[in-house]
Structures are given as C-alpha cells and as structure tokens.
Amino acid sequence: MNGAKRDSDRGIYRVVARREFVERFKDRGFRISTGITLTILVGFLVLSSLAGGRARYDLVVVGEDAVEVGTQLERGSATLAFDVTVQELDDEASAERALRDGDADAVLIGGDRIVVKSDGPADLLGAVQSVSERLRAHQVLEEAGVSPDQADEALDVAPLPVRALEPIDERRQQLAAVAFVGVLALYGQLFAYGYWVAAGVVEEKSSRVVEVLLSAIRPSQLLRGKILGIGLLGLCQLLLIGMIGFGTALGVGRLDFPGGALGAIGVVLLWFLFGYAFYASLFAVAGSIVSRQEDLQATMTPLSLVIIASFFLGIQAVGNPDSTLATVSSLMPWSAPLSMPSRIMLGQASIWFAFLSAVISVAATAALIPVATRVYANAVLRPGKVKLRDALARR
C-alpha cells in the first residue's frame, strides 16, 4: 500500500513539473527573451571576430626609393602584426590628396619623408622607418666598398631574445573570457528563473488556483514540481545558449581551445543546478508570503541584493581566482554558483575543494527545502501578506 502511494506521489510530482515546463515554454516572453539573448550573443561573437583580426593599412609611395621601401614591406608582411597595401602614385600632390580623402594611412615621399594626415598608425610608421633605415644603411655600406652579400650579412642581425618572468597563457586568457560570459549567464538565469518561481506562486495564490491544486496534492509536491519544471526549462535554455555560442565562436575562429570551452559549459550547467535549487526555494518563500504581484518586489529585494553581491564576487573571481575573497565566496552556498565555476575553469580550485563546495551547496539546499516547504504550506492559503515568523510556526 505504501509503495503504491509513493509511486502515485512521484507521478503527481512529474505532472506538476511537466505542466510548469510546458506552460513557461509556451510563454511568449520566454521565446522573445531567448531570441534576444541568442541574437546579442551571436552578434557579439561575430563583431568581436571582425574587430579582432589583423589591422590593415594603406601606404602610398612616391619615387623610386619609396617604391623600394614599399616592396620590402610587402615581402615581409608575414612577419608583421598587420597587413599593408602599397599604392604607387606619380606626384606628391596626388599622394596628399589621397591622404586627405582617407584613401591612405601614410605617404612616403622618396626615401626621406613620411606624411600623415594628423597622427598616423604607430605600427605602420615604425615598420616604414625600420625598412627605410635598413635600405639606407645598405646603400651606405655599398658606397663604402662593401659587397651586397656582406652588407646583407652585416645588417641581418637577429633581434635580442625576450624572456618573460610571467608569460601570458593564451589558453588562460580565453578561458577567463569564457568564465566571464558564464558568470553573466548564471547571474541572468538565477535571477530570471528565481523570479518566475516567485511570480508563479503569487499568481496561483492571488487567483486562488492554488486552493484547487492543494485539494488534490500536497504543498510539497506542488512546490517541488514547480521548482523542478521551471529549473529544467532554465537548464535547457542555458544549454541552448551555450551550444549556439560555442558553435558560433568555433565558426568565426574565436576558440583556439574548444575542449576547454566545452568543459566550461558543463561546469556552468552543473553550478546552475546547484544555484537554482538553492535560490528557487527562497524565491518560493518570497512569493508565498504575499498575495499581489505589486508586493512581490519588496519581499524579493533581500534576495536580489544577495544575488547582485554574489555576481560581483563572481566577477572578482574571474579576475583574481586565487584571492582569499574568491576562495571564501566559492564555499558559501549563496555565492558559490557564481564564484566556483571561474576558479574551476582557471585551474585555481582542486578537485577536492570543488567537491567540498558542491557538498556544502547540496547540504544547504537539502536543509533549506523542508523549511521553504513549511513556509509555503503555511502561507500560500492565507490571504494578504503573511509574516515570515507566522509562516515558520508549526501548525
């Protein structure tokens, strides 16, 4: 008999979760927000890819010596950090006109003058100066009787090697960027879906639909089914955003370490589950103690401040993941979902430390759910605003 009752309970639990998932998925606002988020994400990745490419400059040359400088620049373009297009014009007036019209970034007159409109690009000017100096030095050596081969050997001096005490890890830089996007996504998802839980509770309470529902199922079944259904929708949306963002970044060449990015998506999804389970219970409490949407903002304010503070802690963890503040915040169940993912991605959290943080978050949520269920059960059927002390009292 008891086994049959438990099976029935699980069935009701799933029905509530399915109802919440389907109803929220059909919501026009959900689809619009998802579309806007994806549009912004894809647009940002595409534009950043275009902006992050090699710079391109146009150099106009006038005179035989200037043409030689331009030829040397084009030959050595593979070693430069930019692309240069060299155009030869017949006279100085035409070259200056091209400069004023924006068709050239700099003009080289003969082998002795560079003309710019106001302030030319420093890397282009530096490269022109370097090539020009080498050609002039080569000419001086030949005039002194040095053979061309000897002149080339004398001028082809290897640059001094540079050793960095703290070399920049390109993989770490890319993972830090992914971690930053992950923190933003987690912040938005925790806030949005927590609010949906609270707003859904208030809506059912104000319309008295909850009275009908609770005549057939227990408060714990209704609350947990609601949290599960909305949470699954949030997880699916986050996964969709992550995979489209990953595919776009891979397509435009913004990912040099795709394996690390995929791992980062998995970490973000996992900590969304931990954070959502914790905050959704609190948002349900915030919604159950009021009867109108107008009053919800006041009860949500403390939770909103906690999430905002945790968001800034998460941003700090991206920039300085090994700091004491980041370490402590990654253990607290309210801030860990926004701090720990960055520390894991950037290699600043050991496996045992990440496991400890996850255990603390799960334990805190497990302790919170029964309390939230009691408040929900005691307050959701009472009209008006209910004091939290009264809702916590055993009945």
Image (cartoon, grey):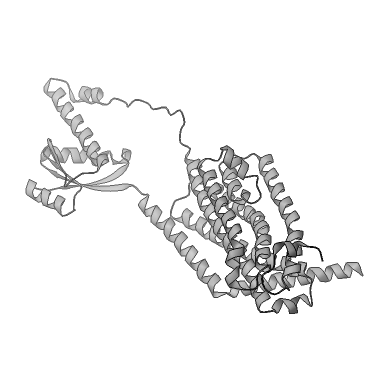
Q: Residue furthest right?
A: 1
* In this view, 43 is above or below 114: below
Q: Foreground: 212 or 88?
A: 212
Counting the numbered discs, the total is 0
| Residue 155, image x, y percentages | 24, 25
User: 249 and 322: which one is in front?
Assistant: 322
| Looking at the image, residue 191 lies above or below residue 258 | below
**Which quarter of the picture shows residue 8?**
bottom right
The answer to whether residue 361 is left or right of residue 142 is: right
Q: In the image, residue 272 lies at what x, y percent?
A: 62, 56
Residue 348, position in %: x, y?
A: 59, 39
Q: Quadrant of residue 298?
A: bottom right
Q: Nearer the viewer, residue 88 or 81?
A: 81
The quadrant of the picture occupied by the N terminus is: bottom right
- Residue 257 visible somewhere in the drawing: no
Decide: is 271 above or below 155. Answer: below
Residue 337 placed where, x, y %?
62, 51
Residue under the image location 25 percent in, 47 percent down: 57
Residue beneath the point at 58% across and 37% down: 324
Residue 10 is at least partly visible in this image: yes
Position of the C terminus by quadrant:
bottom right
User: What residue is rendered at 16% in x and 23% in y?
Assistant: 141
